[in-house]
Amino acid sequence: MAAPHADQPSAAAGSARPASGAPLLELTGFSKSFGPFTALDAVSLTLRAGEIHALLGENGAGKSTLIKTMTGVVQRDAGVMRLEGVPVMPRSAGEATAAGLATVYQEVNLAPNLTVAQNLFLGRQPTFLGIVREREMRRRARAVLADFDLDIDVSAPLESYSVAIRHIVAIARAVDQSARVLILDEPTASLDAHEVEVLFAVMRKLAARGIGIIFVTHFLDQVYAICDRITVLRNGRLAGTGTIAEMPRMTLVRTMLGRELAEATAERHERADLSAAPELVRLEGFGKAGYVAPFDLTLRRGAVVGLAGLLGSGRTETARLVFGAERADSGSATLDGRPVALTGPREALTLGFGYCPEERKTEGIVADLTVRENIVLALQARRGVLKPLSRAEQDEIAKRFIRLLDIRPPDPERPIGLLSGGNQQKALLARWLATQPRLLILDEPTRGIDVGAHAEIIALIRTLCAEGMALLVVSSELEEIVTYADEVIVLRDRAHVASLTGAAITVPAILAAIAEDGEATANAA
């Protein structure tokens, strides 16, 4: 692969491409509802020719829905889209491509078993008397990729190349189909630093040719390295838009999270003395290439460590590594001072770890099983198939935790899929509490639940901590995390960048660490 040559980007690299004149793409009043849920509420966006425009927002902000409504995958309820001043309303991805709007997703939507040339010209192969002219197709493919400084064997299967090259092939295909607007949805999520620079060089080259690029990413450093302007969505609404200069990092983080730099008003618990708390788990140089940069982490009995950061910062990835749901390829782990191997969830269960995932509906509950069956699931898995829990034991465990956590309705035989989100979350907590874990990992334990259940779960975290359990809690609710955490680890761009303890745990301090310029941090070190 011949990588394009590009200068190292500055914090305001996009400013070298000032875009002016009439908008290339203009969205006005885009709205979309799914039943009672409003996914988009009168969202507007303007993209100019030659501009790289970041589309940002936390989970559920509306980014994916906006892209789908723009490209005809989902039909919008209201709103107007103009491309070079002409109203367009594609009703499928094919119509969007024909109109000049192309999307390249994180998971490249090409055929990996076909050759590079076949992917580039799929559906529009050069033919003669109905026969594909393979040699001509390969010649054209080499010419198309040469424009991207990419010299590869176009007769080789696409799957034989890296993710970065697959992205460039997908982009080249879109551009060769006369795309004037290119939407890149998390294209750098699986790329290393060099591959990101290669992709950025391609993006700059396309922008110089007048193509408008909408760039969806969770990496703030990349936003300031490549983009000209930013649009932020929050809860399906337009939260803010502006140039890179108009939206410095702190402003951007506040806009994304919807929080001002003010102290949390919730009552805080008395923080544990970490120097006196007995050590349970120690991780050193723990990480996985392309997943989370190596980190050190100590978890202590009776103490809560919170993981804070924007979506995609590496919070969930850290939790999954600790539980063994993803296997680390570097570093070491000890439990009570003795070396252990965190090779998978089964081993974690044996060690006394519990894990409540963020996506409780897809990764947590088994919707068709009863509340009782869901609660005893982890305990039965730890015991193994040769030591089944008796029905009497299951009933006793389920009733005890339904009563303890006030799960409603208090019916152990009710399918858990019929419960509210808050009560499903309580049942998941019950599943792991039934195993009497030494370490409990909670990923967004209060997301999407009602106020009453929210308060009960926070109270439970404090109670478990007081009883000597070690907790690792992922939360995007900063005001919440400062009320119960004894240490807060701040993550940015899949790396642990700061550790706050004691009086230093404040909302402004967490926001400042999230927003801090990564380049400045490196220089300071």
Image (cartoon, helix red, strand yellow):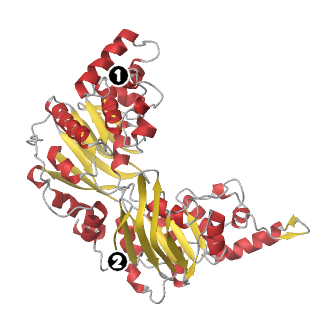
Q: Is residue 131 above or below residue 111?
A: below
In this rendering, position of residue 460 left or right of residue 121: left
Placement of the N terminus among the 4 image quadrants? bottom right
SS for callout 2:
strand
Q: Identify the mark at residue 155; answer none if there is no mark.
A: none
Which comes sooner in the sequence, label 1 or label 2?
2
Q: In the displayed structure, does residue 180 sit left or right of residue 65?
A: right
Residue 7 pos. (x, y %) = 44, 79
Q: Nearer the viewer, residue 175 or 470?
A: 175
Q: Residues within 10 Å of mark 1 (few under 14, many from 20)?
A: some
The percent position of residue 376, horizontal first and vertical second, equals: 37, 21
Q: From this view, report whether residue 1 is shown above or below residue 48.
A: above
Q: How far apart are the alpha carbons under marks 1 and 2?
A: 52 Å
Identify residue for label 2. Answer: 242
Residue at the limit of the structure toward the right, as seen here: 129
* Residue at x 54% of width, y 60% of height: 105
Which of the two residues, 222 or 18, is positioned nearer the viewer here? 18
| Residue 74, picture quadrant | bottom right
Above or below, 324 relative to 202: above
| Other-residue count near label 2 (Cα within 10 Å), few / some / many at <14 / 14–19 / ≥20 | some
Residue ID at (82%, 69%): 135
For badge 1, the amino acid type reads Asp
Name the element at disc 1.
Answer: loop
Q: Residue at x 55, y 61 (%)?
A: 75
Tag 2: amino acid? Gly
Q: Is residue 345 left or right of residue 97?
A: left
- Number of marks present in the image shown: 2
Whether residue 520 appears in this view of the structure is no
Query: Which residue lies under the disc numbered 1?
Result: 411
> How far across and down, in percent of the image, does residue 80 sit?
51, 73
Which is more foreground, mark 1 or mark 2? 1
